[in-house]
Image: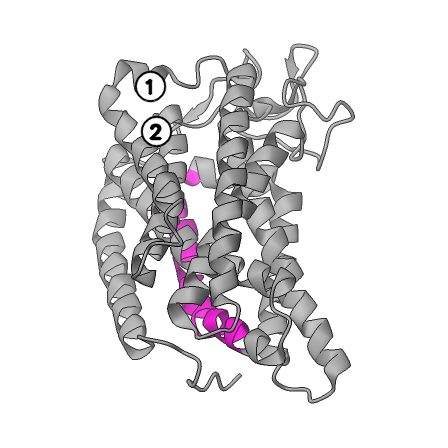
Amino acid sequence: MEIFWYIIIAIVLVVFFILDGYDFGAGIIHLFFAKKEKDKEVIAKSAGLFWDSNEVWLVAAGGMLFMAFPTFYASVFSGFYLPLILVLWLIIFRAIGLEFRGQFQFQMWKDIWDKSFGVSSLLLAFFFGIALGNIIRGVNLGGVENGVSVYEGHYFFLPLWDSSFSPLSDTPGVIDWFTIVIGLIAVVTLAIHGANWVILKTNSSINKKLKEVIFTLNIALIVLTICSIVLWQIVNPNSLNNFAETPLLLVFPLIYITGLVGLFFIKKIKKDSHAFLCSTLLILGGITSSLASLFPVILPSVNDIKEPLTIYNTATSEYGLSVAMTWGIIGFILLFVYMIIQKRLLGGKIDKMDYGH
């Protein structure tokens, strides 16, 4: 039952980053490449028409974590308190930027809300990447200092950064040189995904230029990916053990590599949906590869005193899991029906659709 819920929550998180990921990416593209007002308008619309429904998947993931793995939920939401507050404010400012840019005719206010949308999207992608970096690096569970645990074994607290700025510190912070690399990978990946989304859903004048941008970013992504693997071996020398012991798990890195290779043909790909599929494979392969490398651990411990959090020592009772299954399946069905209806209503190019604000 624990494995079932682990897979379900992983699916929901992957769907969230695929769907809301193109909103983050569209914001990054809007910030750096949209110069004409018409382009700014349609790119903002390509995110604005979808962002609120896409974030339902994040809420669903949080609810499912609370139902199935309450100990992990309590640990993460208390330990990552500072970055979660930052993410909350960024989500608010991104929404404000999207909704307010059409409410003012003065260019100054439009520029302010455009920057709010773009910068918030960029930082959200970066912080979600840093969050993944913290999960695969591990945290100081129990708040161990000088061999003594300050908190209960499943609790921790991280400052935004440690004075050493190193993931090898006994008391690492949220931000260090390893998590920054993972954060940059997230920014580049979602920028590629967002660019593909803009090409797919709009007739923006920069669509042709965006294919050049995607090609360049894909090269940067390969370099960052290789760097992250090397650094990961320094941070956790056993990070690839699961793949050696269970070769079937290699399918997940292969999905990521397929997306990388496919995007090198971005200039030759005729169907925009195929390019979007390639960037979707990047997100799918990247997240699932990270989770597969940790399984069954869901939050490693950087000290030897407290055990890591796993799907087994953080799960609720069998009765709780069975009750959660009933309601979870109902909610899952409603989510997919909601998504399908929305995508059908907003199918095709959105340039002439009314946002409404």
**Residue at the limit of the structure toward the front, as seen here:** 268
> Where is the N terminus found, in terms of image quarters?
top left
Quarter residue 289 falls in: top left
Give, as a three-letter code, the residue at label 2.
Ala
Asked if residue 40 lies in the magenta stretch, the reply is no
Residue 292 — which label?
A: 2
Q: Name the secondary structure under disc 2.
A: helix
Q: How many marks?
A: 2
Q: Position of residue 262 (x, y in %)?
A: 34, 44
Q: Position of residue 12 (x, y in %)?
A: 34, 50
Q: Can see residue 31?
A: yes
**Residue name at image x 46 percent, y 69 percent:** 52
Give, as a three-letter code, the residue at label 1.
Asn
Q: CA distance from mark 1 to mark 2?
A: 7 Å
Asked if residue 59 lies in the magenta stretch, the reply is yes
- Do the CB atoms of the residues marked 1 and 2 lie less than 8 Å apart? yes
**Residue name at image x 32 percent, y 75 percent:** 348
Quarter residue 137 falls in: top right
Magenta extent: 42-70
Q: Position of residue 215 (x, y in %)?
A: 48, 48
The one of 185 and 338 positioned closer to us in this rendering: 185
**Residue name at image x 26 percent, y 62 percent:** 336
Quarter residue 239 falls in: top left
**Residue annotated with mark 1:** 242
Q: Can see residue 189?
A: no
Give the mark, 1 or 2, whose residue is nearer the N terminus.
1
**Residue name at image x 40 percent, y 78 percent:** 350
Q: Position of residue 80 (x, y in %)?
A: 60, 40
The one of 178 and 89 positioned closer to us in this rendering: 178
The one of 152 and 171 positioned closer to us in this rendering: 171
